[in-house]
């Protein structure tokens, strides 16, 4: 008897701990660190380099962003038959 393995596709919702965890891998900082960098840099620009501020701002934008469909072209569908 052959059984099909079910693949579980999970989507990561914006603003969730899972999203923060995934982004922290790419940006090299946690959500809390990103918020702290932005706050401290606003109070005293000498606390963090400008490049780190830009990364922290990008982290927060990615954390809260929601995907939007832009294409109006329908997706590809397999034609059944010969």
Image (spheres, helix red, strand yellow):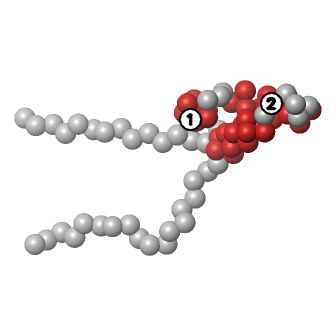
The quadrant where residue 17 appears: top right
Q: Is residue 77 visible?
A: yes
Question: Residue 46's image quarter?
Answer: top right
Taking the spot 69% from the left edge, 30% from the top edge, the residue there is: 31
**Which residue shows up at 13% across the image and 71% down it?**
81
How far from the left and from the top, in percent, is residue 34?
73, 32
- Mark 2: few, some, or many residues within 10 Å (few <14, many ≥20)? some
Label of residue 26 in the image = 1
Question: Would you say 11 lies left or right of 3 here?
Answer: right
Corner quadrant of residue 29: top right
Q: Nearer the viewer, residue 81 or 26?
A: 26
**Number of other residues with Cα within 10 Å of mark 1, as a class: few under 14, some 14 to 19, many 20 or more:** few
Q: Which residue of the protein is positioned furthest toward the left in this rendering?
A: 1
User: In the rendering, which numbered label is found on residue 18?
Assistant: none
Q: How far apart are marks 2 and 1 (CA)?
A: 19 Å
- Measuring 61% from the left and 34% from the top, which residue is drawn there? 27
Quarter of the N terminus within the rendering: top left
Residue named by callout 2: 48
């Amino acid at each position: 008897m052959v059984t099909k393995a079910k693949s579980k596709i999970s989507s990561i919702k914006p603003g969730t701990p899972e999203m923060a965890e995934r982004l922290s891998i790419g940006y090299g900082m946690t959500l809390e660190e990103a918020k702290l960098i932005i706050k401290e840099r606003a109070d005293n620009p000498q606390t963090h380099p400008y490049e780190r501020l830009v990364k922290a701002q990008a982290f927060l934008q990615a954390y809260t962003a929601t995907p939007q469909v832009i294409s109006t072209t329908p997706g590809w569908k397999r034609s059944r038959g010969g």
